[in-house]
Amino acid sequence: MPVDATQTEDTLVGRTIAERYRVLAPIGRGGMGAVYRVEHLMLKKELALKFLHPELGRLDEVARRFEREAEAAARLDHPNIVQVTDFGRTAEGMLFLVMELLQGDSLTAVIRPDGVGTPIPVERALHIERQILRALEHAHASGIVHRDLKPDNVMLIKRDDEVDIVKLLDFGIAKLTLADGEVGKGETLTQAGVVFGTPEYLSPEQAMGEEADRRADLYSAGIVLYEMLAGRRPFDAASKVAIVSMHLTQKAMPVTQAAPDANIPRWLERVVERAMAKKRDERYSDAQEFLQALDWSAGPSRGLPVVSGSPSAGIGRLGEAVLDRVATAWSFLVRRGREAGVPWPRAFAAAGVALAVALVGLVVIMRRTDGPRPAPPAMADSLGRAESLLAHGELEGARAALQQLQSAHPETARVHYLMGNLDYAQGERERALGDYQRAIQLDRGYKTDPVLRGNVRAMLDRRTEGQAAVALLADDIGKPALADLVACAKGCRDDRVRRRAAEAAVKIGGPALIAEEGRPLGKDDDALLDKLRNGKSCRERKAAALELIATGDKTYLDSLRAARERKGGLFGLEGINGCMRRELDAAIRKLDGDKDK
């Protein structure tokens, strides 16, 4: 008789699963099954192992879908997605997943620390939401739709001095739970007692049994953002059926009214409303667009997110926000003019001039974009089909569609970008780097694309692609990638990659930047010191100096001073390290200051 991992008695504790995982203790249970802390017997590393409901293992089609989805989830490599490392089936037929073990709190526990909902401060909520969207964008580009996004599936962990690092759970498994039409022999997943998604966060199309694409995840992300800001869900009722009906028919109370004391800005209310639109075509088209709407909050144009305007006005995305600001500014300027004693006609004229100047600046801000340019409208349908194939995991069909687009439109950056995402998802990482490089060359907006950056970061620690990934970050992305290069200079496993990252970071950000981080070097310090003293060219000696500077080690201070003062030339009076004079001066000042502390 199979062991039920969801039963109350922990008969699994102490057992060995798949000949390599020893079960240590239960972590939690839910409608899908149970999660245990386990130890990998060979690696001596603790992991989390999730068993699915035992009845799932007895359905062949479900098991096949599980394996496909688990394999896809294991390919996801993003700092905000839990890493799946293994999957399989026990001798008793239980399906299981193995993933990294996380220490932290669920977002549910943060919103309801004592079981009562509490609004999260706006900046903290936005910080968390942005990470959720970056994780979704990476997954969507890899052909995976979550379909069960909710606070329970969002873990917040702490690493070093960083807090609120998001880890999204249960990718791929939620997609499995929606496939009730695919289980045969008259059995359905509902008969197995499995919950299809979570009613409080279910998109209207999921509630109606329609195929859900990435916009279903964005709807759920909007619900999660609403709940963080308001401390309560937009739709709640005693009956789950009633909640589903509310998703289909009712408009949520504006989040500013749901939490009147939370200081939620008006523009953010509109962002949430658009994310929660009943019709999927009225939501953000992808996670990147949602992110761009939130990122307006961090810039000089605070209060002007990328949101839909009034269609009848014909003014495009920022129309409604712009008109609100124009009306407010006009009233303010006229009122201040009258208060200052300016006669009505002159107050009216002065307000008009000031408003015209302000609108010019506003138009400049509206036109400015830090992200990629949209593809030509004539390509919208064909690109949409390719992206839909990607979102539904039909990768070979997506490749065929993108190859046709590349042939017909070789100068369109988004085609190369999507091909890069596809190549990365299928393990063709060197090709992905070439695709990404071409996309950036055609449209510099892709330098800040979170999916592109995340995928390139993931390649830094791979032996075959690490140096090429550093080159792309340094040469094609440049300053926006400085933090990635610094992190690699400190932590990349391969010595050559680490050194190249340090040199690139110093070149972009200056020697003091890396010195503050204190990157440890390898065991060949003597070789570097020898090259600093005896290198045949200033360029060769500079490369050695930069690597020594990058360690932040004060023991090299005298060697750097000697290089700074070294003379040569015909009469031995000429400084021969002029090519690195500025870097040496900065490093010596920095190390001297540290020495005196």
Image (spheres, rainbow, N blue to C red):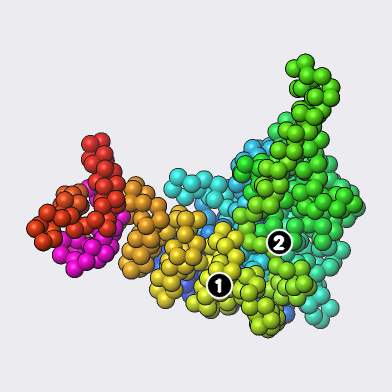
Residue in the picture at 60% in, 60% down: 445
Q: Is residue 252 magenta?
A: no
Mark 2 or mark 1, which has the lower sequence index? Answer: 2
Q: Is residue 305 above or below residue 330?
A: below
The residue labelled by disc 1 is 438
Q: Is residue 67 in view from this perspective?
A: no
Residue at image location 75% in from the left, 73% down from the top: 379
Q: Main secondary structure of the magenta part?
A: helix
Looking at the rendering, which quadrant does residue 3 occupy?
A: bottom right
| Magenta range | 531-556
In the rendered image, residue 32, in percent from the top left (x then y), is placed at: 69, 63
On the image, the x and y values in percent for residue 152 come to 66, 52
Amino acid marked by disc 1: Arg
Residue sitting at the far top: 341
Which residue is identified by label 2?
Answer: 286
Query: How many other residues sit within 10 Å of disc 1, few (<14), some (14-19) or many (≥20)?
Result: many
Asked if residue 509 is positioned above or below residue 34 in the image, the reply reads: above
Q: Secondary structure at mark 1?
A: helix
